[in-house]
Amino acid sequence: MKKFAHSKAGKVVIALVALMFIGAIAQPGQQTTDVSSSAPQETTQATSSSSQADESPSSDNAAPDPAPAPAPSAAEPAPASLKAHFIDVGQGDSEFIELPDGKTMLIDAGVPDAGPTVVSYLKSLGCTRIDYLVATHPHADHIGGLPAVISAFDIGEVWAPNASNTTKTFEAFIDAVRGKGLQIHAGAAGMDIVGADAGYTASIIAPPDGVNSDDYNDYSLVIQLSFGTTSFLFTGDSPAEAIAAAAPGPVDVLKVAHHGSNTGTTSSLISALSPTYSVISYGISNDYGHPTAKVLSMLTAHSQHVLGTGANGTIVITSDGSTVNASCAKPDGQVTPGDKSGGASAAAAAGGAAAASTAEAQSSGSSNDTVYVTASGKGKRYHRENCPTVKKSKLVALSRSDAEAQGYTPCKKCNP
């Protein structure tokens, strides 16, 4: 046997047996790698040929290695957008903005009773943090709900004008800010809340630094948000003259100043702004007659769409950087002029006859009633003697008719 193994023939036979053994091992492994259901026989043959090529590197008929499977492509990122929510808080203001970089901004939060409404709405959107919180001016229908918001969310920066008030509502706002260890950035024209590096801008364009007035509306922060070629203008209760002086240019979306009152809008201003959407934040049957027929007429003449939280509920306007689109909770609602008597009727129907009588008394004083104006004449408002907005000012007594003849209008805080 040893002799046969060392003979030439024996070596050949041993080599053949070894090759057959190797082939027997390789063949089952090749069959288990076949995952194609369309051509299993061809795949097996190709694999077999490759195995033979490994055994005989000099073969010219060896099949090439299969191309590697392409790596799965990464999901395309969602396109950036800016989404402004005009929250229905009744007779007041509140706007929540989802910014293109994922951050958020809240401008005002209505009266104190509206605070829970704003908190609930923001939570329904999945909001846990407000990066920029803006109090436009120290009136209760704008800052009243902010303490509830500050308590419920993580807050980044707080912005407000350089104006203070002695009301409990304002003090509650200040206490809420201090309670979270926050500081207030005193805003004025020329300041950026968000700079261009973010891919959009949020700029304060009014009031001018150093404004001094007996009317808190004159302190209203006016914020212009620009994203791509689109622009949003949030005006608080700013007077039309201050907005016009800031020259914001044409805008796509306008939050109409002061709930659609005559003081916040002029024909020349709306013509210059020529907004695609004009949004009025107001409550149905409010005691102030907002929005006025005069303002609605101007908005209709110079704006493509006029929407209001009273008629349409919460309104959401989205920008992709080049176009804007709106959706409403009540898309069929039509904004109509306010009617003071409507508020009285609604209150009486609900059993609030006393409240209706008070509202009527406040809105229809005698022409001989004594009212008060500031000695400086600033603000062009007449007041009750105990109005908190002129607590520190020297006052001059006039009859209501004389005050109106001199161009004064009633203060919205004390309703003389």
Image (cartoon, rainbow, N blue to C red):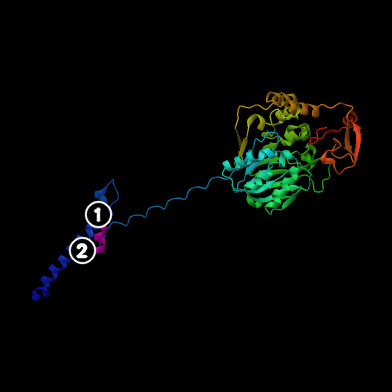
Q: How many marks can you see?
A: 2
Tell which of 311 and 115 is nearer to you: 115
Q: Position of residue 342 (x, y in %)?
A: 72, 24
- Residue 302, visible in the rendered structure: yes
Q: Could you tell me if the residues under marks 1 and 2 are in contact, i.e. CB atoms within 8 Å?
A: no
User: Which element is circle 2 on?
Assistant: helix
User: Which element is circle 1 on?
Assistant: helix
Answer with left or right where residue 9 lies relative to residue 63: left
Q: Position of residue 88 (x, y in %)?
A: 65, 35
Mark 1 and mark 2: span between their CA atoms?
15 Å
Residue 308's image quarter? top right
Q: Residues within 10 Å of mark 1 (few under 14, many from 20)?
A: some
What amino acid is found at the position of numbered circle 2 in the picture?
Ile
Question: Magenta segment, which residues?
Answer: 49-58
| Residue 70 to residue 87: above or below | below
- As for residue 285 lying within the magenta part, the answer is no
Tell which of 262 and 44 is nearer to you: 262
Residue 31's image quarter? bottom left
Answer with left or right where residue 192 lies relative to residue 70: right
Label 2 sits on residue: 22
Label 1 sits on residue: 31
Quadrant in which the N terminus appears: bottom left
Q: Position of residue 61 (x, y in %)?
A: 26, 58
Tell which of 71 and 405 is nearer to you: 405
